[in-house]
């Protein structure tokens, strides 16, 4: 008996030891592999610095991915946004925001609006937005805010329905988040608007997107080539763009991944775990030779952010793997002026950011147009005269004082504090004559006119 007890106890201890030791060994091996795959080993780059009180940079923003495209395309001397414009014989010029918003409208105003940079870019770089909805309230907020600025937008969900949000539910059993992503890619690729696809943005419903900045980023690039943009990290030796900050595929890259997974059976086999669809996508794209691009600007500031703007501005207390395992770590300031995404986990925050970005105007000039009082067709002192003409058909207004005007008006309407119009009553011409006669005779009392000459329509 004792031997059997010792044997069972030994088996238990050995099993417990293996259960603790093996995970520790796997974690150690992963750290070793990941450390060697980090492109930049400067530990200072892993720590986001406090954003405020930084020196402002006013020169043109140049993205790192543009520089790397230059090295691969010999026929292009310099791919930057301004160089791309110059190649089309175009040049930017600043406008007076005060005059544009509040100045006098010109005859060719419609043509001028079309030439505004953001509107012109919308015709040059088409952005299709794919939103994976988990909370209906956030999905509705996206539809009401930044979703309107996408050229086309799709809302995908799993067992979600709402009359005010056009959610696409895949009519098959979904076994993993990768399958949902895979089916969504196939859906838009085979949709009737697929011929308009150029740049496809994939985000979760807690993401705030600035489509105009994405168009600026991709405008100098060819959507027919393979591009995979976002915030890349390393996990288990694999680089991929995290879904937390959203990611972008060019039409060329999307076509290849859809061709690789063009059936439901292939989508199911491509990945079996939930919440790891971004990892599987990066793995499959890597197999196709497509790897994440460096989306930082020339000052190594990020453009795709998986944290809220508040956290990024005030600093992250405990940076997690999002920062420590970043393939292209940020340096110094957190955010580029042409940032594309931020996290917005609550509906009100999304609406607040939308207001600050698109509706609040800061006029740094003298603002001469914005401070001019709006023109009105009728002066304030003439409003009561117009009322007499329209309500009582009185045209001889020169000999009517404000007191008589009040009595005339009060004879038709009840006390102001009641905020009700007296129904079924009208003033006869004799009542108006009586009021005017008393006024000319110097009689301030108009009570008799009011009581004697108001008749009740209901008695007729």
Image (tube, rainbow, N blue to C red):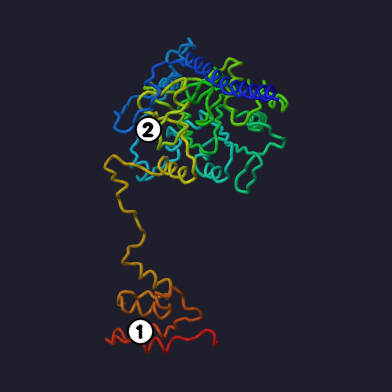
Q: Which element carries disc 1, helix, strand or loop? A: helix
| Residue 401 at x, y percent in the picture | 30, 77
- Whether residue 454 is visible here, answered yes or no, is yes
Within 10 Å of disc 2 (Cα), the crowding (few <14, some 14-19, many 20+) is: some
> Where 287 falls versus 120 (above or below)?
above
Q: Nearer the viewer, residue 56 or 425?
A: 56
- Seen at 60% across and 45% down, the residue is 165
Residue 152 left/right relative to 186 = left
Any part of residue 251 in sight: no
Q: x and y percent of residue 450 in the render?
A: 40, 86
**Of tags 1 and 2, which is closer to the observer?**
2
Q: Crowdedness of circle 1 by 10 Å Cα count: few (<14), some, many (20+)? A: many
Q: Nearer the viewer, residue 117 or 70?
A: 70
Q: Mark 1 points at which residue?
A: 435
Q: What label sits on residue 456 in the rendered view?
A: none
Which residue lies under the disc numbered 2?
Answer: 315
Query: Is 312 situated above or below 441?
Result: above
């Amino acid at each position: 008996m004792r031997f059997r007890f010792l044997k069972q106890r030994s088996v238990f201890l050995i099993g417990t030891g293996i259960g603790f030791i093996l995970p520790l060994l796997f974690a150690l091996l992963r750290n070793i592999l990941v450390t060697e795959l980090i492109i930049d080993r400067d530990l200072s780059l892993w720590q986001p610095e406090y954003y405020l009180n930084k020196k402002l940079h006013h020169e043109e923003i140049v993205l790192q991915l543009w520089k790397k495209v230059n090295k691969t395309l010999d026929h292009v001397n310099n791919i930057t946004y301004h160089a791309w414009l110059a190649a089309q014989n175009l040049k930017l010029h600043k406008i007076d925001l005060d005059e544009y918003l509040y100045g006098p409208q010109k005859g060719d105003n419609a043509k001028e609006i079309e030439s505004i940079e953001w509107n012109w870019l919308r015709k040059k770089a088409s952005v299709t937005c794919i939103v994976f909805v988990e909370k209906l309230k956030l999905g509705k907020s996206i539809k009401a805010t930044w979703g309107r600025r996408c050229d086309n937008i799709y809302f995908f969900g799993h067992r979600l329905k709402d009359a005010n949000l056009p959610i696409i539910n895949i009519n098959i059993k979904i076994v993993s988040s990768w399958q949902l992503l895979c089916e969504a890619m196939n859906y838009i690729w085979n949709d009737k608007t697929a011929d308009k696809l150029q740049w496809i943005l994939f985000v979760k419903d807690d993401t705030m997107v600035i489509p105009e900045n994405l168009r600026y980023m991709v405008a100098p690039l060819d959507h027919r080539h393979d591009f995979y943009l976002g915030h890349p990290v390393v996990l288990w030796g694999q680089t991929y763009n995290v879904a937390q900050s959203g990611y972008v595929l060019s039409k060329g890259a999307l076509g290849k991944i859809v061709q690789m997974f063009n059936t439901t059976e292939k989508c199911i086999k491509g990945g079996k775990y939930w919440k790891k669809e971004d990892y599987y996508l990066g793995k499959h794209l890597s197999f196709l030779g497509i790897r994440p691009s460096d989306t930082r600007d020339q000052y190594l500031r990020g453009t795709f952010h998986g944290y809220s703007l508040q956290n990024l501005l005030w600093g992250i207390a405990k940076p997690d793997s999002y920062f420590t395992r970043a393939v292209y770590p940020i340096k110094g300031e957190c955010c580029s002026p042409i940032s594309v995404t931020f996290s917005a986990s609550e509906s009100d925050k999304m609406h607040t950011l939308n207001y600050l970005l698109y509706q609040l105007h800061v006029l740094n000039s003298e603002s001469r147009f914005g401070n001019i009082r709006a023109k009105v067709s009728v002066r304030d002192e003439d409003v009561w005269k117009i009322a007499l003409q329209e309500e009582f058909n009185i045209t001889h207004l020169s000999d009517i004082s404000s007191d008589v005007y009040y009595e005339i008006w009060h004879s038709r309407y009840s006390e102001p504090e009641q905020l009700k119009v007296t129904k079924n009553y009208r003033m006869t011409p004799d009542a108006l004559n009586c009021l005017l006669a008393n006024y000319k005779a110097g009689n301030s009392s108009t009570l008799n006119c009011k009581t004697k000459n108001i008749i009740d329509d209901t008695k007729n």
